[in-house]
Image: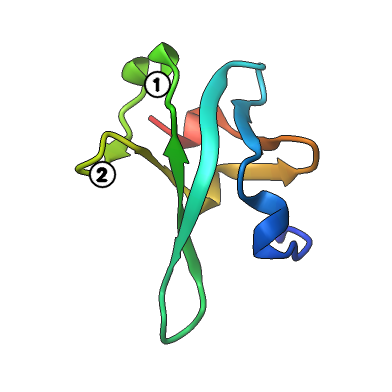
Amino acid sequence: MALDKKPFNQIIGKLVVTKEGKRIGLVKDITFETRTGELIQLVVKDPTPYTKNLNLEHTKDKEVLVPYNAIIAIGDFVVVGEEDLV
């Protein structure tokens, strides 16, 4: 599923939630493949305790990495499918 393109600065700072409404944290950054521009992951700061239940990668600074393919929608929040996170 293709998402509408959003400027980088409209995604930074947004709250990441599951489609069930569980909070994940705030978007700090986005990682991407420099050759193709393909988005790889959202870097999420201030992860909630709920993220400990999910099998997500972490940065050395304890930020959570959410795979880009888990994103369902971007609006007031970044909505992710929990089934794509485990």
Report x, y in % for residue 37: 51, 78
Task: Tell whether 71 sits left or right of 38.
Answer: right
Q: Secondary structure at mark 1?
A: helix
**Is residue 59 among the parts visible in the rendering?**
yes
Residue at position x 60%, y 25% in the image: 18
Q: For residue 73, which quarter of the picture?
A: top right
Report x, y in % for residue 30: 49, 57
Residue at position x 61%, y 27% in the image: 17
Task: Tell whether 14 sits left or right of 27.
Answer: right
Task: Tell whether 73 sits left or right of 42.
Answer: right
Q: Depth check: 7 or 5 in front?
A: 7
Which residue does the numbered mark 1 point to in the structure image? 51
Q: Residue furthest bottom?
A: 35
Q: Mark 2 or mark 1: which is in front?
A: 2
Q: Is residue 57 above or below residue 35?
A: above
Residue at position x 79%, y 36% in the image: 76
Q: Depth check: 78 or 62 in front?
A: 62
Q: Residues within 10 Å of mark 2 (few under 14, many from 20)?
A: few
Which residue does the numbered mark 2 point to in the structure image? 59
Report x, y in % for residue 27: 54, 42
The quarter of the rendered structure image containing the C terminus is: top left
